[in-house]
Amino acid sequence: MLRNCIVSFLFIGAICISYASSAQIQNNAEEAFRISSETNKPVLLVFAGSDWCANCIRFEKKILSATEFQTFAQENLVILKADFPQRTSLSTALQEQNASLAEKYNPKGEFPYLLLLTPGKSVLSSLVFSNQSSSEFITEIKSYIAK
């Protein structure tokens, strides 16, 4: 019995540590910019079609899910995802928010479309995902954060 409790405790602890070390992706713009302002971290705004855009899915798997990127993002970025799925329904409020973000920052409707924004919502740079590694993508972001 004690052994089962210890194993359960270690398992739950490992999950908590794993979650705490991963970058949390925001879908609420107001919250993302609040965090950005409080921490003075830029916002990585990701326009995605999570269930239909092949490059968006590739970006999610290759960059956003990479441990190296999550560690970097946890320390240096606030990630805001504006998703435009076709098979999954979003709340009306989230759809309206994402449409408003797209109108302001992505009027051409490109996917994935990646922007680095200041806490004041100004564009630092647009980024290109060309199937590069997470370390190459981090290097690109660092060049804009350092300016």
Image (cartoon, rainbow, N blue to C red):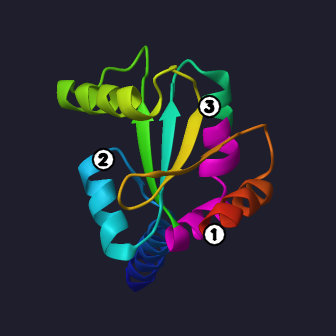
- State the mark number for residue 147: 1
Q: Secondary structure at mark 1?
A: loop
Figure check: 106 above or below 130: above
Classify the position of the C terminus by image quarter: bottom right
For label 3, the crowd category at 10 Å Cα-Cα, with few meaning under 14, some 14 to 19 and many 20 or more, is some
What percent of the width, then of the height, locates residue 141?
A: 66, 59
Q: Secondary structure at mark 3?
A: helix
The stretch drawn in magenta includes residue 75: yes
Amino acid type of disc 3?
Answer: Ile
Q: Main secondary structure of the magenta part?
A: helix
Pick the front one: 125 or 2: 125
Q: Nearer the viewer, mark 3 or mark 1?
A: 1
Pick the front one: 18 or 59: 59
Q: Secondary structure at mark 2?
A: helix
Q: Which residues are magenta?
A: 59-76
Q: Please tell me which of labels 3 and 1 falls first in the chain.
A: 3
> Marks 3/2: CA distance?
21 Å
- State the mark number for residue 57: 3
Pick the front one: 52 or 95: 95
The answer to whether residue 49 is left or right of residue 91 is right
The answer to whether residue 51 is left or right of residue 68 is left
Q: Please count the marks in the image.
A: 3
Residue contact at pointers 3 and 2, CB within 8 angstroms: no
Residue 132's quadrant in the figure?
top right
For label 1, the crowd category at 10 Å Cα-Cα, with few meaning under 14, some 14 to 19 and many 20 or more, is few
For label 2, the crowd category at 10 Å Cα-Cα, with few meaning under 14, some 14 to 19 and many 20 or more, is some
